[in-house]
Image: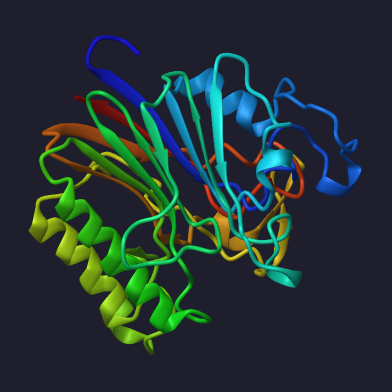
Amino acid sequence: MNSNLLNIVTWNVNGIRSRIFNNKTCSQLKKNKYFSPEINSSIYNLIDETNPDIICLQETRCSEYIGKLATIAGYNSYFNESKLDGARSCNRYSGTAIYSKLIPEKIEYQVPGYEDKEGRIIIAHYSDFIIINVYSPNSGTNYEKKSRFQDSILDYIKMISEKKIIYCGDFNLAIDTHFEKEKVKPCPGLYSFELDYYKKLIDYGFIDSISIDDNIVFTWWDQKSNKIKTPEGKETNVMRYMNKGWRIDYIFTFNISKCNSKVLKHIGEEYCPHASDHAPVFGKIFL
């Protein structure tokens, strides 16, 4: 970390074991073996380009034990896992992680008023600031749960409001879309209570760090859209290629006046298929 500048990345990786550290799926990795970023892998290129002090990941889809096998030189790692069974068990569903060059003073996995059994929250306390990394529920299957989740996080923030706070992750709410939101039927990510939450954060004093010069803006693209070949011969989906997406991943700051972030759409496109249907957001925070 250089003086007061903090480089931070947030990224929904859609499974940390699938084409993030290498061009392998989780079933191709050797069991119980450590693995690190291979040259030209998505995480290798992300670190090489941004030199982040802290990396916040969502939808890791792994247990804490397996997460610890994914090592990055120079970083300490902290994982939160789903405590559920079956299709929502830790190695198949949800999960969050923080990789940090700085050693936190404390790590939390819960906030008052919301019992997180899905590994959606991980909070790192440092001497000068706090990072809240979240993977917010999708309101399509967790309508009431998402409302409680959002409100509980904001209530927790009000308890620590004297601190410098970085609130980031996959919020599963779309402030920016490639279409006019007002002309479509409300759906998950676009319900009024979700969009109102964004306004609550801004009204409370949070800054949405996205740069006005960012020409990508969107962080998620529908991977079910038609597949095409790029001029370079890589496979992608037409919505990502045309940058017709949604912005659902954010870096918000509180009690921090100077910050900016941008979407790194090319990270994750190294392999075919891509590493994730999301792109990382890279932020520069001046504490």
Q: Which one is in front, 115 or 16?
A: 115
Q: Residue at x 32, y 85 (%)?
A: 183
Where is the C terminus found, in terms of image quarters? top left
Q: Does 219 sit above or below residue 187? A: above
Q: Residue at x 57, y 37 (%)?
A: 267
Residue 128: horizontal and vertical position, in percent? 22, 25
Residue 167: horizontal and vertical position, in percent? 30, 46
Q: Is residue 151 left or right of residue 72?
A: left
Q: Is residue 160 left or right of residue 166?
A: left
Q: Residue at x 72, y 60 (%)?
A: 92
Q: Residue at x 63, y 24 (%)?
A: 44
Q: Does 52 sit above or below residue 59? A: above
Where is the N terminus found, in terms of image quarters? top left
Residue 102: horizontal and vertical position, in percent? 41, 19
Would you identify the image quadrant in which residue 222 lies?
bottom right
Would you identify the image quadrant in which residue 36 lies?
top right
